[in-house]
Image (spheres, rainbow, N blue to C red):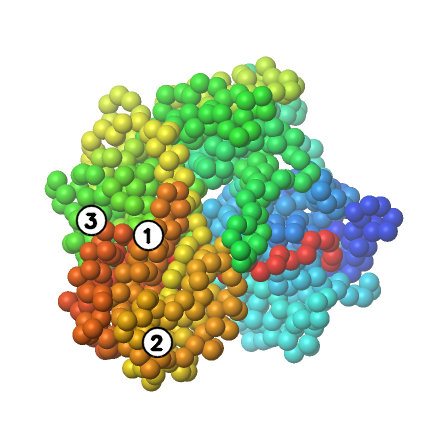
């Protein structure tokens, strides 16, 4: 593993401890569980251990104006933010953030709140955790430091929930983070005796002092995590659930470790006295003769990863008036470029007053494009005044299950703060948002201004691995369906991947084109990849880089700018790609939209002026330079110079054809509806050959019933499934027996039936049974029910084409091709899926697949069922609350 050694750079450690709380449980509603006297012992102990490790320097270092380890005892959330800003702005090597205090999580466990001295917990309120700071906000501020690596250490209850927060960060920001957590997710821990440090920090400090083994070596974060887990296991420490207490380590980039302590050439020393942190005045100062950007930070807005960009201009004159804040919501694919543009604006002359003060600062955050459209169309009232309890939508239908209803969209939670500016990836999003929805009309409390002309453009491309089925000449242009089919013909086994259509417009625009030529469920089966879909084009390309084989066989549908400007996914080498340009997919064409909210009259004139100035700057030469630098084409006029990415080797066209017609709002909405149906709850019908010849293939973990049982975890609470036994005497009215009719039920019901299932002293009529199954699922899938469907037939092929059977292979092939229900043939016979065999022909005709004895039948069946179903229902969320 690559090691990062921060010695010789400007490093900074911010140690934050909250030991005393104003609101106590039993005294005030929602108070915390008590003070944490042990935390007060943590800070000096850890500070001394860090200095002893030789990585951090006591006293001013070159390029720094204060000690490299700073202790902070914040009075509130504002103090914490200011300390984070200062630390992020000072470090250029290693930035370490440590927190000890009470931690709290919501019922879903998706966020971790670091509770400050005035923290409380008020369930049902719009602000459930007043007086606390989201870990999302902390990570987002730290993400834009100049430091090359960021290490976050959390010593609090529920610390392990921080891993989910880290994963939500944009990859470019996440990759330089490492997160060391005192305990696994969902667990509370004991802070220990008041007279001693907390158990985790005491062990952490001891490891930093002694973990190098006394032989002059280095201690890395990976080694530190191992030492802590080993010590806690040996001591038998337990969480408050009486389960083993296991410290956790998570890295945003698995390829880099960090040196935290060293004995090589450094004399350990213990500084005397305490260095306390005092909040400083607001960092807004007039510019004298030299203007410099001292701090760039990014702050998360609610649950969105936001960019709070502030230029601190230091000089000799007095403080400035706080600048006008603008909140900017954008598409996930645009987030990085828009943030770069906002930063360039904030440090430009255009954003200076005559006194050298900044006019405005811009909060940049991204949210799923589908959620943004829904929030503007249907939920603006809830956005401005969040209800205490969000109403729920959906519900159970069917006789056998009662799944939990899906929560309604909460804009503050799911999108972010009310924006002043919206930059969607397409003007069609504005049209979609202005359509009257379920809660539109009089409930709308936000007005969307007229969209600007596109700020830039980037065609959508099919990025094909170079040397692996790449197109040439005219093969690089055409309708998307034809380009995809041609790629798969040139590279047998080649796959096509696309981003989440609900996340970014790039995914939805390509989905609309794919659905135009094929049924949505067939498209989704052909695109399915393990795990959730990538949020952005960059994440998709970076995910492919994690798997060399997948990178070599997968064509990615992404915006062209990613190929022009390059994708930074850490040290791994990415396979170069060649772009093919679909003629029926509109490209990205971001527009600027002003958002005006009712009852937001305060500083309206200043806000309007700031929005206008920023819009004008984006459309001008300086703003366009940022877009061009990230690989975008000018939206109008002659093609200007666009960045050529290193290593693409001409993978993009020098002057691509003009983009197709502007995206249509109706097509995007239709495609989104079809996508949700096609990827919603699935339907699987298992056919078990139960004829006498299957007796040797029935028992044990490799038997047919056991294989079906092992695949059931791929089905969730809202999926339907059924089981037929295929064997019957000649002349029987049906060629199968329904062991379980199609419906929604827990897997235990299937297990009971399969445990009792037996082979029959009769032959199977496989083609007649398959014909009946195709008819049944075709009938169920009519109309609005466009859910994913799959027929699974497990057989030994003994009765294929036998005399006396009613069904024929030709009948099945015709029906399978006409009905489009995919069939997975699972043959226990070697060569059962060879080219030209009945099983292979049925699978090909239906758009399904085939497994035989040469495959891992259990794994293959489980994967195919999981592609159709929604997987097991998630485990219960960890309890909310606060603790150490």
* Contact (Cβ within 8 Å) of mark 3 with mark 1: no
* Contact (Cβ within 8 Å) of mark 2 with mark 1: no
Q: Residue at x 20, y 49 (%)?
A: 485
Residue at image mark 2: 690
Q: Residue at x 61, y 59 (%)?
A: 876
Q: Is residue 476 visible?
A: yes
Q: CA distance from mark 2 to mark 1?
A: 24 Å
Mark 2 lies on a secondary structure that is loop
Foreground residue among 291 and 163? 163
Q: Quadrant of the N terminus?
A: bottom left
Give the crowd class for mark 3: few <14, some 14-19, many >=20 residues within 10 Å.
Answer: few
Looking at the image, the residue that sits furthest to the top is 605
Vertical relation: 404 (above or below) 309: below
Please state if 622 lies on the left or on the right of 100 as rendered.
left
Residue at image mark 1: 778
Give the crowd class for mark 1: few <14, some 14-19, many >=20 residues within 10 Å.
Answer: some
Which of pointers 2 and 1 lies earlier in the amino acid sequence?
A: 2
Foreground residue among 455 and 723? 723
* Picture quadrant where residue 325 is located: top right
Please state if 72 lies on the left or on the right of 108 as rendered.
right
Q: Which mark is residue 485?
A: 3
* Picture quadrant where residue 732 is located: bottom left
The x, y position of residue 710, in whole percent, is 43, 71
* Picture quadrant where residue 790 is located: bottom left
Q: Quadrant of the C terminus?
A: bottom right
Q: Residue at x 49, y 50 (%)?
A: 174
Please state if 345 lies on the left or on the right of 770 as rendered.
right
Which of pointers 2 and 3 lies earlier in the amino acid sequence?
A: 3
Vertical relation: 829 (above or below) 687: below
Q: CA distance from mark 3 to mark 1?
A: 25 Å
* Contact (Cβ within 8 Å) of mark 2 with mark 3: no
Q: Is residue 614 visible?
A: no
């Amino acid at each position: 593993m690559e090691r990062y050694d921060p010695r010789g750079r400007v490093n900074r450690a911010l140690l934050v401890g909250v030991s005393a709380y104003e609101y106590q449980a039993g005294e005030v509603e929602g108070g915390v569980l008590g003070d944490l006297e042990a935390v007060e012992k943590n800070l000096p102990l850890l500070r001394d251990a860090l200095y002893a490790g030789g990585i951090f320097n006591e006293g001013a270092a070159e390029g720094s104006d204060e000690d490299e380890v700073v202790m902070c005892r914040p009075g509130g959330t504002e103090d914490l933010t200011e300390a984070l800003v200062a630390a992020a702005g000072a470090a250029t090597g290693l930035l370490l953030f440590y927190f000890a205090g009470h931690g709290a999580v919501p019922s879903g466990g998706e966020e971790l709140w670091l509770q400050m001295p005035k923290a409380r917990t008020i369930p049902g309120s719009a602000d459930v955790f007043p007086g606390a700071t989201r870990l999302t906000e902390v990570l987002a501020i730290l993400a834009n430091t100049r430091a090359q690596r960021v290490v976050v250490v959390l010593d609090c209850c529920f610390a392990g929930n921080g891993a989910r927060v880290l994963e939500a960060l944009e990859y470019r920001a996440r990759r330089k983070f490492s997160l060391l957590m005192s305990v696994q997710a969902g667990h509370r821990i004991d802070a220990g005796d008041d007279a001693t440090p907390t158990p985790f920090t005491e062990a952490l400090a001891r490891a930093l002092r002694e973990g190098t083994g006394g032989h002059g070596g280095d201690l890395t974060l990976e080694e530190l995590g191992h030492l802590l887990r080993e010590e806690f296991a040996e001591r038998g420490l337990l969480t408050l659930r009486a389960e083993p207490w296991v410290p956790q380590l998570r890295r945003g980039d698995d390829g880099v470790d960090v040196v935290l302590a060293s004995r090589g050439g450094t004399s350990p020393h213990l500084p005397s006295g305490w260095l306390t942190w005092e909040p400083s005045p607001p960092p807004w100062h007039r510019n004298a003769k030299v203007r410099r950007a001292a701090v760039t930070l990014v702050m998360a807005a609610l649950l969105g990863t936001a960019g709070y960009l502030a230029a601190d201009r230091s000089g000799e004159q007095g403080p400035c008036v706080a600048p006008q804040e603008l909140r900017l919501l954008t598409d996930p694919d645009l987030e990085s470029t828009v943030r770069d543009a906002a930063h360039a604006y904030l440090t430009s002359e255009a954003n200076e007053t005559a006194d050298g003060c900044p006019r405005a600062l811009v909060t940049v955050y991204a949210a799923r494009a589908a959620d943004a459209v829904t929030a503007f169309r249907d939920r603006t009232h809830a956005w401005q005044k969040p209800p205490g309890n969000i109403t729920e939508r959906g519900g159970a239908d069917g006789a056998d299950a009662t799944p939990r209803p899906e929560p309604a969209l909460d804009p503050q939670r799911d999108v972010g703060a009310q924006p002043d500016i919206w930059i969607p990836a397409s003007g069609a999003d504005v049209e979609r948002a202005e359509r009257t929805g379920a809660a539109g009309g009089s409930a709308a409390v936000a007005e969307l201004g007229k969209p600007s002309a596109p700020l830039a453009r980037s065609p959508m491309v099919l990025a094909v691995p170079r040397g692996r089925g790449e197109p040439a000449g005219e093969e690089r242009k055409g309708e998307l369906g034809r380009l995809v089919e041609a790629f798969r013909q040139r590279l047998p086994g080649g796959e096509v991947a696309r981003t989440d259509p609900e996340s970014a417009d790039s995914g939805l625009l390509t989905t609309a084109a794919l659905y135009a030529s094929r049924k949505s469920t067939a498209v989704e089966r052909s695109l399915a990849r393990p795990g959730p879909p990538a949020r952005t084009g960059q994440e998709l390309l970076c995910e492919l880089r994690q798997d060399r084989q997948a990178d070599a066989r997968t064509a990615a549908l992404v915006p062209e700018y990613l190929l022009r400007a390059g994708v930074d996914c850490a040290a791994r080498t990415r396979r170069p790609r060649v772009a093919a340009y679909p003629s029926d997919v509109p490209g990205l064409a971001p527009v600027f939209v002003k958002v005006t909210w009712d009852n937001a009259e305060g500083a309206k004139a200043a806000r309007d002026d700031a929005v206008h100035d920023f819009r004008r700057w984006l459309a001008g030469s300086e703003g366009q330079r940022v877009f061009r630098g990230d690989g975008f084409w000018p939206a109008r006029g002659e093609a200007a110079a666009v960045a050529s990415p290193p290593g693409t080797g001409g993978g993009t066209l020098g002057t691509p054809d003009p983009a197709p017609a502007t995206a249509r709002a109706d097509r995007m909405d239709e495609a989104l509806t079809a996508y949700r149906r096609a990827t919603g709850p699935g339907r699987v019908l298992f056919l078990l050959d139960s004829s006498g010849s299957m007796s040797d293939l029935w028992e044990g973990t490799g038997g047919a019933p056991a294989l079906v049982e092992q695949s059931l975890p791929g089905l969730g609470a809202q999926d339907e499934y059924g089981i037929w036994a295929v064997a019957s005497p000649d002349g029987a009215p049906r060629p199968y027996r329904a062991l379980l009719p199609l419906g929604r039920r827990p897997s235990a019901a299937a297990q009971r039936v399969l445990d009792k299932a037996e082979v029959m002293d009769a032959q199977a009529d496989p083609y007649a049974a398959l014909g009946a199954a195709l008819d049944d699922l075709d009938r169920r899938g009519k109309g609005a029910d466009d859910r994913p469907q799959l027929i699974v037939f497990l057989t030994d092929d003994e009765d294929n084409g036998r005399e006396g059977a009613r069904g024929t292979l030709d009948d099945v092939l015709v029906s399978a091709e006409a009905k489009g229900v995919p069939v997975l043939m699972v043959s226990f016979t070697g060569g059962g899926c060879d080219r030209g065999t009945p099983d292979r022909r049925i699978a090909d005709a239906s758009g399904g697949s085939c497994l035989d004895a040469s495959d891992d039948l259990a794994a293959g069946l489980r994967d195919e069922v999981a592609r159709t179903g929604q997987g097991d229902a998630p485990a219960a969320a960890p309890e909310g609350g606060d603790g150490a």
